[in-house]
Amino acid sequence: MSLAFAPLRHPAFRLLWWANLAANIGLWVQNTGAGWMMTGLDPSPVMVSLVQAASMLPVFLLALPAGAAADIIDRRQYLIAAQAWVLTVASALAVLTWAGWLGPWGLLFFTFCIGMGNALNFPAWAATTPELVPREDLVQAIALNGIGFNLSRAVGPAIGGFVIGLAGTEAAFALNAFCFLVLLLSLLFWKREAPASPLPPEHFLGAMRAGLRFVAASPAMRAAILRACVFFFFTAAVWGLLPLVVRQRLGLGPESYGLMLGVMGAGAVGTGFALPLLRTRLPTRGSMVLAFSLVSSVALALLGVSGHWLPAAVAMLLFGAGWLAAASTLQAAAQFATPAWVRARAIGIYQLCFFGAMTAGAVLWGWAGTQFGVELALLLAAAASGVCAFAVRGWRLDLAPVREAPAVPMPRPEAPAPELGPVLAGDNGRVLEVVRYTVDPTDREDFLAVMREARRVRLRSGAVGWVLLDDVAHPERWIELWSVESWTEHLREAGRLDPADRAVLARAAAFQIGGGPPEAARYLAVEP
């Protein structure tokens, strides 16, 4: 099998990929039907634009909560519930439309509800992909997901228009419901091996806080988010200004606008198939994102100066290539930067940030097009995109290789006293954790450098606060303090450490002098 299709050799990924392709086609049919129906119910530009706003707003409202829920609930059951929600709402929308009982605000309400289901889906689907394929196939699996999305965007509106013309808007809505039924049935056939844990599920609000702390303390995840925001903010100029380019500069109609989007989709699909070869030429994720950010910048500039459909089509072909390669690589970087226990909520934060950047970019470049003209706005976006792509290239997307951990005794706290068992079982009160080090003063700077890494390790694994203290009377004595929200959260810490985290903590313990490991202790906060 070609490397481009290698992830499809895994049965679970193949099953869900095809089903998700059907669901994405259904969504584009739904969007086409909703937009067309609104032009008949209330043709004002505001109401028509609110259809798109109603479908996207839930992403901003639910990305982080959806990610937290997908991490603390069995992911298969969570996805089944989300598809059942969309299936129910889509079916109700089709029935009410067929009965003639739906007005403009009712259409917006149902569009918003379907958008809620999609917002619940996004982080869970992204976090599910690493469960379906081995690590070496992950990047291409994400690229195939992008190919599927672009295929659905190319054929979905056309199918929607044909169905509406043949059988009416209610048929388009019914087709969307059928597509989600296909996805729901595929999830029922998927036999997921859920990881077992002796600990109870995380609390919902605590899970969201843990996700935010993880992202804040993860340099690789912050780099993926920053570079995604830069890329999507500037390339959003295409979404905001392409209709004006087609209508005003090229003097073409809506059919040509659809064809331009189709050309972009073709560029994305072709690049998705070529990604395995491209990765041999650009072996690091950072170099891939930089290269295709520059390709997208060239596409923006070419689109800005195009006065004929041919160079504009070339620009959209290049833009589709740059979009797919950069977006799939950035999402892969975010996936690699997150362990399984926090993956869905971290991806939810990532998606929230880049959707926000896209929205802000579309608004800003639309305003710039109004103020300065479409050509100048696209050229400004192209120049700024290229400059900023170079400016953020130092934010590394590739994880540093794991350094070998020294073979040293690690600090181990004493077991809890039996009489405190009922108190700990109540899971009330924060837990303060302490490690006491004795370090040769000549190793001070090296020790501090390792402890800066240890701080990020503690925060990523659940700490709500961390501090390192130096004994002013005995400079060889150090105390590391951090706290977690509860005893159960403390028990989860060890399972959240990956090999790189354990290597950092081992390097910190290696500074201990005098024989034996550093001394560790735990304290429970109690009300006096």
Image (tube, grey):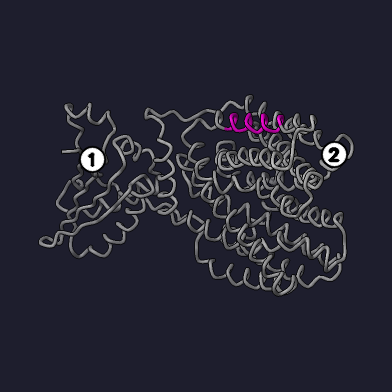
- For marks 1 and 2, the one nearer the N-term is 2
Q: Quadrant location of residue 461?
A: top left
Q: Which mark is residue 412?
A: 1
Residue 164 is labelled as 2
Q: How far across and how far down the image is residue 23, in percent?
A: 71, 37
Q: Amino acid at mark 2?
A: Ile
Do the CB atoms of the residues marked 1 and 2 lie less than 8 Å apart?
Answer: no
Residue at the spot 22% in from the left edge and 47% down from the top edge: 434
Closer-to-camera residue (101/384)? 101
- Please tell me which residue is depicted at 33% across the width and 47% down the height of the picture: 463
Q: Nearer the viewer, mark 1 or mark 2?
A: 2
The one nearer the camera, 442 or 366, is: 366
Give the x, y percent position of residue 211. 44, 46
Q: Is residue 481 left or right of residue 378?
A: left
Extreme residue toward the right, this view: 166
The rendered magenta stretch, by its main secondary structure, is classed as helix
Give the amino acid at mark 1. Arg
Magenta-drawn segment? 79-92
| Residue 299: x %, y % from top left | 73, 66
402 with respect to 491 (left or right): right
